[in-house]
Structure formats: structure tokens, C-alpha cells
Image (tube, rainbow, N blue to C red):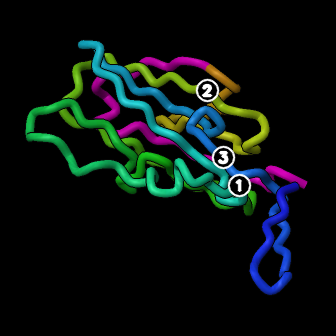
Amino acid sequence: MVLRFKTGGVVSVEPCPPAESVEALDELIVEDAEGYVQDLYVRNYSRPLGMKLAYAEDMPPEAVEGTFNVRFQSNKMIEGITANKVKKKVSIKLKNVQYPVKLKWNFKNNNKIKYWLVKKGQAPILMSASGIYEFDNSIKGTIQLEAEAEQPCR
């Protein structure tokens, strides 16, 4: 539990310590056949970001046309999931990638987020704490996930 003191003696209680670095977040790594890599991160909105990450949520603008470009559809570097036990669609857009494309992941138990890999015409696949999945060009430039979060700190 983190106590934050404010002027005037008012105390606010935050049940979760802030995520101070990307190592505390869930990680998605996309790598194409030529070895280009993009790291993306997911956080539980019930866990605040520390000062180092507070302004790191958004991706920079897209690079020059024709350049490897992988990002969340939201254009965020750190995607957020609300802790309400409702599945949220999380789309990863791929541009100028060479197939096959690998999705690697490393999820932290204390973030309390479950993930499913969604492929058209198939039942969603529950993703484990870490793994790798390879896609061919049938995904048409989008990796589709679903995520569901619960309160991380109680």
C-alpha cells in the first residue's frame, strides 16, 4: 500500500505501488522475418504509472512510408486495460512487415490481466505467462488480442 500525503493533511491511499519501469508491465514483442522488432506494453489501469513512465504512453508519429511499423491501433506504446472483468479488444497494427511475424509475450502475474489470442474462424486461445506465436500473412496486417483485468492489489 502506498500512502500519498497532500498539503493540508489529507491522505490518499493507493492500493498499488506505481509501475516505475516497463519491466513492471506486461510485454508484447513483435518481430518480423527480417529481424525488425517492436516492444509494446500493457498495464492495468488500477495500477498507476510512476514518474518515469507517466509521459511514455504514446507512440511517436509513424516513420517514413515503407518503414517497418508496428503499434497498437490506439497509437499508444502502453495500452491500458480497465479492471472491470470485461474483455477489451486489443489490436496490433502491422505495416511494412515481412512474414512470418512472431508475437512473443511476457506477462506478469501481479498485473492481473488475462489475454486471449483471437484468430478469425477459431475459438480465442488463452495465452500463458510467456510464449511465442508465429503468424503468416493471412492475418492481413492485424494481430488481434482480447484482454480482461481485475484489481491487481487488494
Q: Is residue 1 or residue 41 the one in the foreground?
A: 1
Q: Earlier in the sequence, mark 1 or mark 3?
A: 3
**Quarter of the image containing the N terminus?**
bottom right
Segment tinted magenta in the rendering: 131-154
In contact (CB < 8 Å): disc 1 and disc 3: yes
- Residue lying furthest left: 65
* In this picture, residue 127 sits left or right of residue 150: left
* Residue denoted by label 1: 47
- Residue lying furthest top: 34
Cα separation between marks 2 and 3: 16 Å
Q: Earlier in the sequence, mark 1 or mark 2?
A: 1
Cα separation between marks 1 and 3: 7 Å
* Residue denoted by label 3: 19
Q: Secondary structure at mark 1?
A: loop
- Residue lying furthest bottom: 8
Marking on residue 92: none
- Comparing marks 1 and 2, which lies closer to the viewer? 1
Q: Residue at x 43, y 18 (%)?
A: 134
Q: Is residue 69 or residue 5 the one in the foreground?
A: 5
- Comparing marks 2 and 3, which lies closer to the viewer? 3
Does 33 appear in magenta? no
Q: Is residue 101 above or below residue 151?
A: above
Q: Is residue 44 above or below residue 125?
A: below
Q: Is residue 117 above or below residue 98?
A: below
Amino acid type of the residue that numbered disc 1 sits on in the rendered structure: Arg
Label 1, residues with CA under 10 Å away: few <14, some 14-19, many ≥20: many
Q: Secondary structure at mark 3?
A: loop
Q: Is residue 112 above or below residue 128?
A: below
Amino acid type of the residue that numbered disc 3 sits on in the rendered structure: Ala
Q: Secondary structure at mark 2?
A: strand
| Quarter of image, res 22 | top right
